[in-house]
Amino acid sequence: MMSCFNLKTWLLSLVFLSYLLSLSHGIPNKEFRVRAVNLGGWLVTEGWIKPSLFDGIPNKDFLLWRLNENSFRFRVFNNQFVGLDGINVVAVSSVSTDSEKFHFVKEGGNSSLVRIKSSNGYFIQAKTEDLVTADVSEVNGWGEDDPTIFVLTITSRFQGEFQVTNGYGPRKAPQVMKKHWRTFIVKEDFKFIASNGLNAVRIPVGWWIASDPTPPSPYVEGSLNALDNAFLWAQEYGLKIIIDLHAAPGSQNGYEHSSSRDGSQDWGKTDQNIQQTLHVIDFLTARYANSPSLYAIELLNEPRAPGATIENLTKYYKAGYEAVRRHSHTAYVVLSTRLGTSNSREILPIASGLNRSVIDVHYYNLFEPQLNNITVQQNIDFILTNRSSQLNSVTTSNGPLTFVGEWVAEWQIEGAMQKDYEAFAKAQLDVYRRATFGWAYWTFKNIRNHWSLEWMIKNGYIKL
């Protein structure tokens, strides 16, 4: 049996650079609010964006795309971008172009006041409650009643490698990421892993790794070299590696750990998108097929239903399996179950026809709403009863192997003592070691102690 764990989003990112903006315009008692994720995220409007402007649907969320330090595009519902119809500010196109670019002009210093200049060179203004226009050429001062002035405040954040590299920009991002790769996971960590009886690492990677050293903007060079180092260290200490495609082009789940640009989920919507993902699998398998440390390729981490349909996933998993087999007949092929569905057996028919295939399930009590505000013992009982049953349901005598690819000894309990965490972790280990392929802890290093397997081992919370 294989005991695995995960090296945090190592080849994605751990460095969070986040901004969330809030804007309000100068018309008294009216409000225009923008929440921007890392200068590239959610945009919410109230007040002057009226139903008549956006197909009768009021107060819908926007997605704010950061292009550089002060330039943005606004994407609204139905994936349309805000642009100009003459001088009127409207949702105009499903394709992002320069004509939908807006520029933030700040008052200066530490002021929170900004103006928004449109692609036509004019400033936008809230002309009436029903009309927003880009027709102001001359502005003077920063008076409170000027309808071209907006107030900007930081309110929240969005994470992920796209946000980090896009947020820092092309000059600073390479420095930040290279320092991260050089210092966060090092050779001594692999020595620690092996000396504690663990025998494998599950390493998440992003799709842009196949284009290194010239990945598409805003990603930067270096992730492939980091993975190469991991293989060298793994071989030295006798460890195996599971390469996990954690971020697919377009994002397979819309979450920051899949490097979503703005929270949208676009993976699998086109054949081109799927073919691009297959190219990544082909590239990674070909590169490491002859390494004695390559143990498995995970085709896709946590695709989310209903956006990632079972039809598209079936098509991709079968093609991904063939891509791996072109280069290796021994590497296991790992198929992740979908988020957002209770039917973890739905990919059994796919995996059952594939040699050396593995079904990956992820178990987090922390994210189960029904487990909030229950006792320590109730959490443990849920592991021993419910998780055991769930794992048994995907484990078959002659079928694919099973892998608890992510779990963590953390929960929604205030004031839990170390002995409580020890019991919770032990219960999970007792159940998850029954998985016929093994388990992986999320994660090896983390700023939150209980999410860090290294910290949990060093402090006696987890005993292997």
Image (cartoon, rainbow, N blue to C red):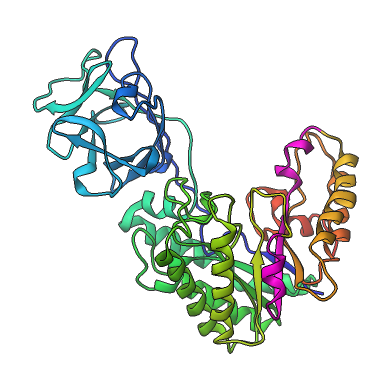
Picture layout, residue 138 above or below residue 452: above
Picture layout, residue 423 above or below residue 274: above
Name the spot of residue 440 as percent of width and height, x first.
72, 64
Number of marks drawn: 0
- Please give the range of residues in magenta: 346-373
Task: Looking at the picture, tell me which residue is in the foreground, 285 or 180.
Answer: 285
Residue at 38% x, 41% y is: 78
Residue at 90% x, 41% y is: 377
228 left or right, relative to 34: right
264 left or right, relative to 75: right
On whether residue 266 falls in the magenta region, the answer is no
- Quarter of the image for residue 245 reads bottom right
Residue at 88% x, 40% y is: 378
Quadrant that contains the C terminus: bottom right
**Residue 218 visible here:** yes
Task: Looking at the picture, tell me which residue is in the foreground, 422 or 148.
Answer: 148
176 left or right, relative to 214: right
Picture layout, residue 284 above or below residue 203: below
- Quarter of the image for residue 362 reads bottom right
Quadrant that contains the N terminus: bottom right
Name the spot of residue 60 as percent of width and height, x first.
41, 30
On whether residue 362 falls in the magenta region, the answer is yes
Q: Residue furthest top?
A: 28
Task: Looking at the picture, tell me which residue is in the foreground, 53 or 106.
Answer: 53
**Residue 189 visible here:** no
Name the spot of residue 412 as percent of width and height, x first.
75, 38
Name the spot of residue 208 as percent of width and height, x first.
43, 67
Residue at 32% x, 29% y is: 54
Q: Residue furthest bottom?
A: 290
